[in-house]
Image: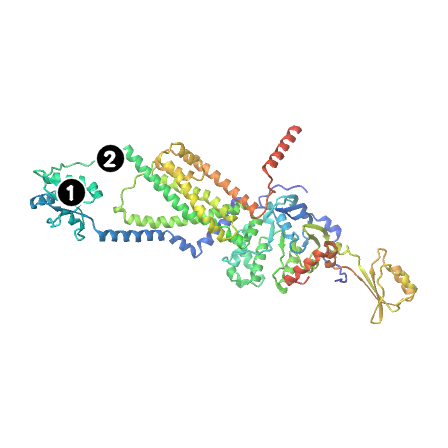
Amino acid sequence: MLALSAPTASAPTQAMEDARPPAVMARGLVKRFGGTEAVGGVDLTVPAGAIYGILGPNGAGKTTTMRMLLGIIDPDSGTRIVLGHERPHQVARAIGYLPEERGLYPAMKAVDAIAFMGALRGLPQRVGRERGRAMLEAHGLGNAADRQIRHLSKGMAQTVQLLGTLVHRPRLVVLDEPFSGLDAINQGKLETMIRDLAAAGTTVIFSTHVIAHAERLCERIAIIAGGRVPFEGRVDEARDRIPAQVRLETRAGDGPWRRRLPPGAAAGRKEGGGHWWTFPLPATGIEAMLRDLVEGQAGILSLSIERAGLHDAFMHIAGEAAARALANGSAADGSPA
Amino acid sequence: MSRKADSPRERLSLPAAAMVVAQRDFLAILLSRTFLLFLLGPLFPVAVAALAGGIGDQMRGSVGTPALAVTMPAGDAARVVAARRHLGETVGVDLPEVRVIPAPPGGAAALLGRPELNAGAVLTGTLAEPVLLGPEDRLQRWQGLVRLLLAEARSTGTLEVPALALAPARPSTSDARRDRMSVAQGGQLLLFLLSMLLAGMVLSNLVEEKGNKIIEILAASIPMDAVFLGKLFAMLAISFVGIAVWAAAGGALLWLARDALPPVPAPAVGWPLFALLFVLYFALNYLLLGAIFLAIGSLAASVREVQTLSMPVTMSQMLIFFLGNLAVANPDGGVAWAATAFPLSSPYAMVSRAAQEPGLGVHALALAWQVLFVALFIRGGATLFRRRVMHSGAPRRPWRERLRLRRGRDAAELTSV
């Protein structure tokens, strides 16, 4: 679906972005499981303080890539530099990680679970408990602080785990499919939380197969399909891979002015009171053409220039099969694509 | 981008990370309801043994101790009874009870078939020509005692038993050796029982983390070695809690029954040092076995797989125990040294040595040797876990290829030199 382009007010300029040191950099990451190549040469650059999305259908290699970045598994080849270190465990205290498959000890109290996850990252248990209690309170879960995880709802347990991921105030947060399993309200809250983290200078990387989240949140994205990265860069760069479409409505259906329309322009479709023309935005612009149309009395009723949405860009970049897999994954998850 | 130097603030040290895991595991087990059952666990075999012993006593009581039936002329029989009483009082020989019975019409052998008499054998004939009648095995066991009885009965006066002054002294060399061997065997048996009871628990230790995916968070936060180390030490601490409770309960019982207990021989290094060494060897035995069991268990995908592994694991523990047992008979023999050098049987062999040999230097070496293998086993287990379960690590190459690569590197180094 095409959407009117909206300038991203928070997106930094290219120059500002280049000035930031990368929080994560990966070059040529390869991972095979037995004879299967799960990831076949991933290159990523995540600027510090950015919200970075890894997009791809299920099985594309998103989780494997993240696990390599975090040092949970070692790549068969390639290099990764995370917060300036080649071995991610060396900066483990500065990283927060929410895995795709959520896991907590069922017999632990919510506040203890948060403190334990903080302690694994070097935060003293006492401080972890204090912060955990305050965070739970802030998220409306104050009365669940001393309840065992097994007695919490799935959504509450998920929130507890997310708070445990953040309790030690990491500089880099990696979230694997963080929106999966959350209802619409909690998805909204999570989006706000991610924006707040980035505003405070934390680098956030998250994977998703729901493009809408990435489109709303990310400055930069990597599209992964079949274990490879066909695109890595800013969201608007991805959109620019598809030329913007011009939609023109004229009163007249024919006349000498029609010769001024680009050769690829679709035949004028009559709808309502006018004739509709659709064609890719020419690289030279449309000012001269519009002048000729006005002089030729085409009778311009309306004009819009529509930029491609991220979904169309994804389809264009990753291929139709990957886009279909992504759409199927979204449908199965019940999330809007 | 240049690689930054290690910053101590950026990562948790291995002991600190292990401590976080150990603390969580220790408290989770200690505060669980099942821990009480764990503490009560040894009561069940004790109760079964007591019950079985009680039933045995009852059965033995109902059968009664067999008596010696005497069918001799009245004068001879009276002298046999008097001799039995005198020998019982002075020499303290455990003689069978004597029952004087008139000779039955069917012959003396008929007495053996009368249940109310419970006669093990029948002494018949006269004092001049006695005959002992009974089953073959009973005759073998009683013939010496009956000869002594008859000798006393036939003597004109009563046997003169002189007064004897008793002067307790240190046991002879052979007695001391035998005593220490029994301490060595007892120590090994206790070590084996405790290890078998406790080390098997670590088999299922990583199943919870794997089941609820916490392993992913642990693996992202701390080195896998720290996870293994923490889990092992948590279980060791739990074991110590259990042992402390059981020892306190057992000690209280022994103290109550102290007068009825036989004296326990002292080990060669003395009781305090022996106790200390026993605790250290138990800890190392536990860590050595535990590291292997944890690694084996971590590869299992489910509780069912862990249960399947329990049998071979128990059998392997028994084999190790038997190997350690071989060191008892000859602590300086080749087999004993082999058992000492083999890391898994080393604690057993060294407990035996502590009971039998006074030297301490070899214990320091053995402890260091065992600690080294604990570290190697933990590292090996963690590596195996990372490779097999987390699918991490460099791809495995056939050994020929690795050799070729190594030769290639060596050649390149030589060329550059």
Quarter of the figure that contains the C terminus of chain B? top right
Mark found first going from the N terminus, 1 or 2: 1
- Whether residue A127 is visible here, answered yes or no, is no
Identify the amino acid type marked 1: Leu
Mark 1 vs mark 2: give the one in front: 1
Residue extending farthest to the bottom is: A273
Give residue A72's position: percent from left, percent from top.
Answer: 59, 48
Give residue B242's position: percent from left, percent from top.
Answer: 40, 50
User: In the shown orientation, is residue B30 left or right of residue B149?
Assistant: right
Residue extending farthest to the front is: B106
Residue ID at (15%, 39%) = B147
Residue B169 circle label: 2
Q: Quadrant of residue B195?
A: top left
Identify the secondary structure beneath mark 1.
Answer: strand
User: In the shown orientation, is residue A205 left or right of residue B19?
Assistant: right
Identify the secondary structure beneath mark 2.
Answer: loop
Give residue A10's position: percent from left, percent from top.
Answer: 72, 57
Give residue B194's position: percent from left, percent from top.
Answer: 39, 46
Same subunit, labels 1 and 2: the answer reads: yes
Q: How many marks?
A: 2
Circle 2 Cα neighbour tier, 10 Å, few/some/many (<14 / 14–19 / ≥20): few
Quarter of the figure that contains the N terminus of chain B? top right
Question: Of B318 and A233, which appears nearest the observer?
Answer: B318
Which chain is mark 2 on?
Answer: B
Which residue is the site of mark 1?
B132
Which chain is mark 1 on?
Answer: B
- Mark 1–mark 2 Cα distance, whole angstroms, equals 41 Å
Identify the amino acid type marked 2: Ala
Residue B234 circle label: none
User: In the shown orientation, is residue B321 left or right of residue B8?
Assistant: left
- Whether residue B354 is visible here, answered yes or no, is yes
